[in-house]
Amino acid sequence: MSIVELDGVSKIYHVGDTPLYALNNMSFSVDEGEFSAIMGASGSGKTTTMNMIGLLDKPSHGVCRFLQEDVMTLTPDELAYYRNQYIGFVFQSFLLLPKLTVLQNVSLPLMYRQVSAKEAEQRSRNILDQVGMSEHMQHHPYELSGGQQQRVAIARALVGRPKLILADEPTGALDSMTGQVVMDLLRKMHREQNVTILVITHDRSVAQYCDRIIQVRDGRVVDDKENVRQTAGA
Ligand code: ADP
Ligand code: MG
């Protein structure tokens, strides 16, 4: 079943009197269970695509469906509900809250739901264990390395059991060794957590971790194929 479908989607910005096509007739769909990359150079439309899929933006033309629902037909409340319930976001700059501990950062998404404090803590401890951060639960983000912060951010994205993780340049702020560790962790979470993962990146070596690479340029798909992964270290 498809989780996301873009069908002839364009996004037009008006800069002065010239229309700028951030997305220009973009079409692809992602099925539940995929671990895929959207890859393209800077300015190719990746962030615009992610905002569309993440229900933060709507098409100027074309149809964007999330879980088979046309996003144009969803109310702002429904969009917020879908985002909260079904999508976990991971960003280049981690975006952890500095005054909260690791455990509190991860619990936070559950606080916006009808989850009891006790269950929230239980689930947060459990997912922090899965990402290898159980020894740092009482630490604050500034006490952690970049790679550790991204582990926490991945735990925070997963704690609500979303259907989809959107990871925008998840390794962009990390050195390449740490970036590999984070991509390995995303693969492990994909295997173990029954979640669809879309990685958005400009970096081919990051996209290589994924099973499918959707390549975009000038706001459209220019290549879309299965990625036969090299073995580790190759
Ligand atoms: P990427 O994330 O791949 O770098 P973006 O999706 O951010 O690309 O941008 C695609 C194109 O749309 C770029 O040419 C960018 O300058 C333009 N763009 C993005 N957002 C806006 C905006 N709010 N107003 C005007 N132009 C924009
Ligand atoms: Mg971008």
Image (cartoon, rainbow, N blue to C red):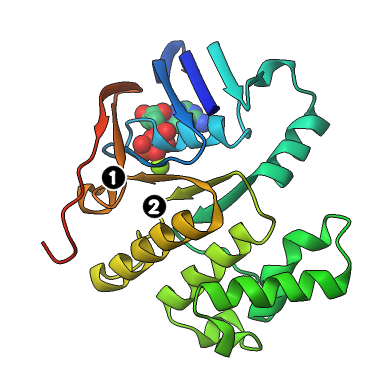
Residue 59: in sight, yes or no? no
Residue 79: in sight, yes or no? yes
Q: Residue 39: x and y, percent? A: 30, 38
Q: Tell me which label, 2 or 1, sits earlier in the chain.
A: 2
Q: Report if the CB atoms under discs 2 and 1 are less than 8 Å apart.
A: yes
Q: Amino acid at mark 2?
A: Glu
Left or right of 232? Residue 87 is right
Residue 19 or residue 30, whichever sits in front: 30
The number of callouts visible is 2
Which residue corresponds to the image point at 82% horizontal and 56% vertical from the top-left? 112
Which residue corresponds to the image point at 28% horizontal and 70% vertical from the top-left? 175
Q: Is mark 1 within 8 Å of ligand 1?
A: yes
Quadrant of residue 187 within the rendered picture: bottom left
Please tell me whether residue 100 is drawn above or below residue 171 in the rendered image.
below
Q: Amino acid at mark 1?
A: His
Quadrant of residue 118 within the rendered picture: bottom right
How packed is label 2: few (under 14 Cα within 10 Å), some, or many (20 or more)? Answer: many
For label 1, the residue is: 202
Q: Residue 169, labelled with which disc?
A: 2
Per the image, label 1 sits on a secondary structure element best described as loop
Q: CA distance from mark 2 to mark 1?
A: 8 Å
Please tell me whether residue 86 is drawn above or below residue 109 in the rendered image.
above
Q: Is mark 2 within 8 Å of ligand 2?
A: yes
Left or right of 63? Residue 82 is right
Per the image, label 2 sits on a secondary structure element best described as loop
Q: Residue 141: x and y, percent? A: 57, 79
